[in-house]
Image (tube, helix red, strand yellow):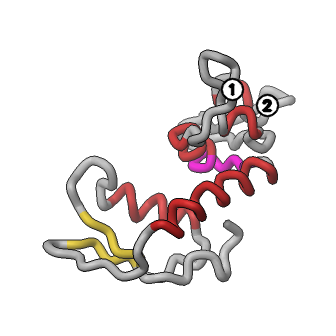
Amino acid sequence: MPLEEELLPDPCNDRTLTSVECPRRPNKPLSMERVFPSDSSGNATYAPDTELIKNYQHAGGLLAKDAFIAVCQKAKAVLQRESNLLRVNGKVVIVGDIHGQFYDLLNILRKAKFGKSNKKFVFMGDYVDRGKN
């Protein structure tokens, strides 16, 4: 289902702002089936659809509780395999405490051109202690 179909409707058809000026947010949480889509044989994939999650959350949408927990469990397994001390050579972007401010994090990554350059990022901590997300 395209993201556009999941946006809150304009029941009175009196919206004065365009969706570009003031985007509508998704009206329901992203389901487990959408986060972990089925492969060609009908089995749920191991990896979540990160592009869908990123776009959905950037639009103000949320994940269903079971999907959120499953993504966290998969992330936990990856992080547990990683070293907690790394040597970082070269130029880096240092990101301070984000305190759960997800949209601030998205803006930081967008401005730093995350994924479009070879920049290295160091996140200092305090990821989830205050904000809504």
Q: Quadrant of the C terminus?
A: bottom right
Amino acid type, mark 2: Pro
Between residues 91 and 101, which one lies in front from this camera angle? 91
Which residue sits at x=66%, y=25%? 38
User: What is the residue that sits farthest to the left in this orientation?
Assistant: 90
The image shows residue 108 at horizontal and vertical percentages of 40, 64
Position above or below: 11 against 131: above
Position above or below: 36 against 71: above
Q: Secondary structure at mark 2?
A: loop
Secondary structure mostly seen in magenta is loop
Amino acid type, mark 1: Asn
Which residue sits at x=58%, y=70%? 101
Disc 1 target residue: 43
Q: Residues within 10 Å of mark 2 (few under 14, many from 20)?
A: few
Question: Disc 2 and disc 1: Cα gap in Å?
Answer: 33 Å
Is 14 one of the magenta-colored residues? no
Between residues 114 and 47, which one lies in front from this camera angle? 47
- The magenta segment is 57-63
Which residue sits at x=79%, y=31%? 9
Residue 82's image quarter? bottom left
